[in-house]
Image: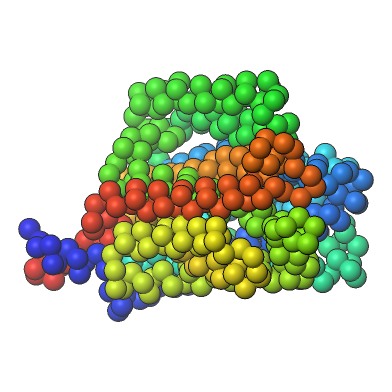
């Protein structure tokens, strides 16, 4: 039986661990995440141009986010489970092919609603990082250091993702002035097509395929529940809390989780093993993913609009130009990449659990600093750097932690759940923040600019949810997410 001192050493990542033959696979997957970054960054500067091209109001652009969220509700649990059953690489190819077809359909769309369908189906890319993490962990088992190598690889993958976001956003902003909109949309389509062949020829399959029977009924039940929940939250943001349809959809979505859980508990091979939510090393990870989704997915648009708000007219905001705001966002994304790349360095000195706790506390500090310090560009930039470093570490650490703590044969499902729960957290936050920004503290409607009380709500909720995540992670067993200690014989 190991002493606590031995467990502590085992919980920290040994600096001498190397990728070895796994390095080639990680290198090819870095290209995949660069492509994911292209998808996530390229279209953002073009959203207004897309609305003008199709002749729709800016508000209709909200349907794009809602469409991809609904596709993600089905894609993540289905392909994550199939990855564990028949191969993570195989499902990477399937999801990349679907993303490539959707990306190519977007410049060919003749109207906004066809574009919306193609945009939504492009959301197949959301399962890439969970599948990649599961594939790396599976292949790293033979090295004896799967947790440490997976964390190191996850840091590189997320760093590549954020680099892709920055490069794509900058490129799109420059190219739109010289290349017509339908033609410029071929750039991400070509990148995704190239990504398919990189996976096909460069990535080897997971060595462990578990087979089994696919739980179609379970998938249908969880898809309907998630569609109801995310659809209701989207309608809440669009129609407001006064719409009966909003609450009917939300209640129906939540109610459908009950038959889903009851069905899954009776299955020998469920699509999602709901018992994982009670495992000591996993429930804090899933809770953290949901709470983290509040800030990483729900708070970015409010931060951008706060920067653009004129302080002379409204008494708050930075009055930043579009160029200054893009620098602010670019620095934030850069700190995400730095935070992800620093994760494996930090875990050489502290246990992975404490690295997660520290990252969550950085996110909490970054957003709570907004409460006293939000009057200047420098203050806002500082706050976002602090939050960004913690957020980048969490983006990389959460799927890696889920992979290392998952039951054997459920790695893909566990990593996929971190994305699913994070998406739900972001959807809830987006709806709540939208309502908060639309009203003043006294309940009166805000004008064109979001209300100051709404921004205070955003900062407070983001800070407190990150703090709650840090507290939840304290309940994780001390040496969770770590590779087992070597035996006395050196085995």
Residue ID at (88%, 59%): 181
Residue 383 shown left or right of residue 148 in the figure = right
Residue that sits furthest to the bottom in the current view: 16
Q: Quadrant of residue 479?
A: bottom left
Q: Is residue 173 visible?
A: yes
In the picture, which quadrant includes the N terminus?
bottom left
Image location (x, y in percent) of residue 244: 68, 20
Image location (x, y in percent) of residue 100: 70, 54
Residue 477 shown left or right of residue 373 in the figure = left
Residue ID at (62%, 20%): 248
416 over 182 or under it: above or below = above
Residue ID at (51%, 72%): 338
Image location (x, y in percent) of residue 236: 67, 32
Of 283 and 276, which appears nearest the observer? Answer: 283
In the picture, which quadrant includes the C terminus?
bottom left
Residue ID at (29%, 41%): 279
Image location (x, y in percent) of residue 401: 37, 55
475 over 43 or under it: above or below = above
Q: Is residue 27 visible?
A: no
């Amino acid at each position: 039986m190991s002493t606590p001192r031995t467990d502590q050493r085992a919980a920290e990542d040994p600096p001498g661990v190397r990728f070895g033959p796994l390095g080639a696979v990680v290198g090819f997957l870095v290209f995949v995440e660069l492509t994911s970054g292209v998808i996530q960054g390229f279209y953002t500067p073009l959203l207004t141009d897309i609305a003008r091209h199709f002749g729709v109001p800016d508000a209709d652009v909200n349907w794009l986010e809602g469409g991809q969220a609904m596709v993600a509700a089905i894609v993540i649990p289905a392909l994550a489970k199939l990855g564990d059953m028949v191969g993570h690489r195989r499902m990477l190819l399937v999801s990349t092919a679907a993303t490539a077809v959707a990306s190519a359909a977007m410049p060919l769309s003749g109207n906004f609603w066809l574009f919306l369908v193609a945009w939504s189906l492009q959301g197949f890319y959301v399962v890439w990082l969970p599948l990649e993490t599961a594939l790396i962990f599976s292949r790293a088992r033979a090295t004896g250091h799967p947790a440490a190598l997976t964390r190191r690889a996850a840091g590189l993958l997320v760093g590549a993702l954020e680099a892709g976001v920055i490069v794509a956003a900058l490129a799109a902003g420059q190219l739109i002035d010289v290349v017509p909109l339908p033609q410029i949309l071929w750039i991400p389509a070509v990148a995704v097509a190239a990504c398919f062949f990189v996976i096909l020829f460069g990535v080897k399959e997971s060595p462990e395929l578990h087979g089994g029977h696919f739980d179609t009924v379970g998938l249908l039940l969880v898809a309907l529940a998630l569609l109801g929940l995310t659809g209701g939250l989207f309608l809440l943001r669009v129609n407001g809390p006064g719409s009966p349809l909003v609450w009917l959809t939300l209640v129906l979505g939540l109610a459908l989780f009950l038959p889903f859980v009851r069905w899954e508990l009776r299955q020998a091979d469920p699509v999602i093993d709901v018992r994982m939510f009670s495992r000591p090393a996993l429930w804090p990870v899933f809770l953290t993913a949901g709470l983290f989704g509040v800030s990483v997915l729900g708070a970015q648009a409010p931060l951008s609009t706060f920067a653009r708000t004129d302080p002379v007219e409204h008494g708050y905001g930075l009055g930043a130009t579009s160029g200054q705001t893009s620098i602010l966002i670019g620095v934030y994304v850069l700190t995400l990449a730095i935070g992800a790349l620093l994760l494996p360095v930090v875990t050489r000195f502290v246990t992975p659990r404490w690295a997660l706790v520290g990252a969550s506390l950085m996110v909490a500090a970054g957003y709570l600093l907004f409460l006293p310090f939000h009057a200047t560009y420098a203050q806002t930039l500082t706050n976002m750097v602090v939050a960004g470093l913690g957020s980048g570490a969490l983006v990389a650490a959460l799927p890696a932690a889920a992979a290392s703590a998952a039951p054997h044969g459920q790695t893909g499902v566990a990593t996929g759940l971190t994305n699913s729960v994070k998406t739900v957290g972001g959807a809830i936050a987006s709806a709540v923040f939208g309502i908060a920004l639309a009203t003043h503290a006294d309940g009166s409607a805000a004008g064109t600019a979001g209300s100051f009380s709404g921004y205070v709500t955003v900062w407070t909720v983001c800070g407190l949810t990150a703090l709650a995540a840090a507290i939840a992670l304290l309940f994780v067993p001390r040496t969770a997410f770590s590779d087992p200690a070597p035996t006395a014989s050196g085995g």
